[in-house]
Amino acid sequence: MASPSTRGAAIDLKSVSKHYGSFIALDEVSLRIEPGEFMTLLGPSGSGKTTTLNIVAGFTEVSSGSLDVGGKSVIGVPAHKRNTGVVFQHYALFPHMTVSRNVAYPLTLRGIANPDREARVRKALDMVKMTDFGHRFPSELSGGQQQRVALARAIVFDPPLLLMDEPLGALDKKLREWLQLEIKRIHRELGTTFVYVTHDQEEALVLSDRIAVFNQGRIEQIGSGRQLYDEPETLFVGKFVGDSTILRGAPSTSGDETAIDIAGRKVTTAKRLPGGVKPAMLLRPEKLSLARRGMGGQDRNTLPGRIGEAIYLGSGSKYEVVLADTSKAIVRSTLDAETFAIGDEVDLIFAGSDVKLLADDEKADLNLT
Amino acid sequence: MKQPGRILLGLFCLLVAVWLIAPTIVVVPMSFNDKKSLAFPPSGFSWQWYRNFFTNPEWSASLVSSLKVAVVTAVFATVIGTLAAFGLDRMKSRVSGVLRALLITPMVVPGVVLAVGIYAVYLDTQLVGTMTGFVMAHTMLAVPFVIIAVSASLEVFDKRLETAAASLGATQLTAFRTVTLPLIAPGILSGLLFAFVTSFDEIIVALFITSPYLKTLPVQIFSSITRDADPTVAAVGTLLFIATSLVIGAGLLIGSRQGKR
């Protein structure tokens, strides 16, 4: 087995498009994934993330563009010649074969004979902690166990690239969280390039080195989880990754400053968008604070509101504040902060420097389901 | 309250069961008749009609012909029908709907119509009374049954397993052989049985294309019973009844064992 650093393959998509008749599933997508990287394709359903994965796997042909894996073009190369592991949401284990035979399947196809084959099957099952289940049939396993077997089958032939299409989508939350850590461990131990598709932003944050956020067949932004959270480049990314509050209203600018009028109250930030672009303000929950009405600081932005929902989280509280223009703000406070009850009249307070000023995009709201 | 209703229901079920199997059961005592008559109930006991069936060359020859035709037909019909069902399954649904209807027609067209057509063509091509002629005609009649049986199991087959096999390195043919085929095998097997039975008890077309040199068992039964009241017919019937019961029983047994897994 080669050392971890040399095992993963680089993937290079350049201007890849996919059309189905007049429907554009992927629109000029370019994405470079480094060898050994854990890249997550994140987005709502129909955003193009699964299409991208299927193109890399060889299940779908591109309409235009280029795709290199490990420095070689794989356009036109059928799936069975790509030597790429794939894990599916629906497990796709062969029901007429035992766990061992399922895992041995790709080795048999590669002409690997028995002492070696058996050893590698055992090693792969060890890796996913399913050693004692070799003689069972898939129907005798739980969902989480089946998916671990599917993972063993996808890595047993040492592919330089492993693709996972919402592998934990059918499992319950506790199991999902535990398997996320398992997948992270296996990625670290193998050094293989992982490409992971999910619509769950928390899962993406837990797992990934980098995340590519898909929307309507395009990539909105590529970056680490922290970059996406702290510096979203579009309103869609800001809304999709993490909780956020969006403030919209009649804008006005003076010098380098932008103000937005929300039901007669102005909030300002010392930032500006290029001319002609309608701005919206995005704020993360921990950048917002609450005070009883009239007790807010004068030097900062304040907006009147009423507590619509109060959720105790253990480590703190989460509030939904209904503002004067009926829009909602999400605030997270720490344990030692003052607590509020539903219906309390409050001031929402934030610093202009914590505002992300982004181009307003009405479509960002529609695509979140 | 519930009891009388349940008893009534039970009696009704019994009635239906008797009505369904009585004609078959009646044949059994008739086959042991000691006189050459098909009278029911029989007047005495004897094995002579069974002896006659196995020793009279007319009867044994027709049994052998029927088995030959049915086995070859079953094999051809299963191969053709399975491939057809697979093709239909992978087609655009609008095209496959029309094609499927077309392929099923031998099942819905009246047998006599088919028989007349086949007879006319066979007369010109010297296929009357030949093994080839029988197999061709019966295969045509049996293919729809295979298509229906195999299509049903393809319907529940998860095609995504083939995609998974491809990702693991299997060519389309290997994926079909190692994944698809084993999983639709029960459908293929039941198609094979249907095809065999379709040929084995086919009488209409057989009556048209038969010759003194090649007679199938149904033709022999039919001509024997129209000539005279020969209880050998009842003996044949009883043997067939036992044979089919065994086959179906075995099938159910295999089915239930698979279900358990």
Image: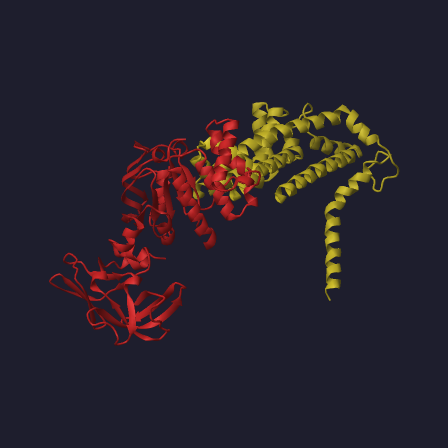
Chain colours: A red, B yellow
Q: From the viewer's perspective, is B211 left or right of A7?
A: right
Q: Position of residue B75 (x, y in %)?
A: 59, 30
Q: Is residue B162 visible?
A: no
Q: Is residue A320 visible?
A: yes
Q: From the viewer's perspective, is A304 left or right of B143?
A: left
Residue at point 38%, 51% (across, down): A203
Q: Position of residue A245 (x, y in %)?
A: 29, 63
Q: How many marks?
A: 0
Q: From the viewer's perspective, is A96 left or right of B66?
A: left
Say which of A169 and B155 sits in front.
A169
Name the quarter where the C terminus of chain B is drawn.
Answer: top right
Say which of A261 and A189 sits in front.
A189
Residue at point 51%, 31% (across, down): A119
Say which of A38 and A266 sits in front.
A38
Q: Tell which residue pokes out farthest to the front in this image.
A: A336
Q: Position of residue B169 (x, y in %)?
A: 44, 32
Name the quarter where the N terminus of chain B is drawn.
Answer: bottom right
Is B29 drawn above or below residue A321 in the view shown? above
Corner quadrant of residue A138 = top right
Q: Position of residue A213 (x, y in %)?
A: 31, 50
Is A206 drawn above or below residue B104 in the view shown? below
Say which of A42 and B8 sits in front.
A42
Residue at point 39%, 39% (across, down): A162
Q: Tell which residue pokes out farthest to the left in this image.
A: A255
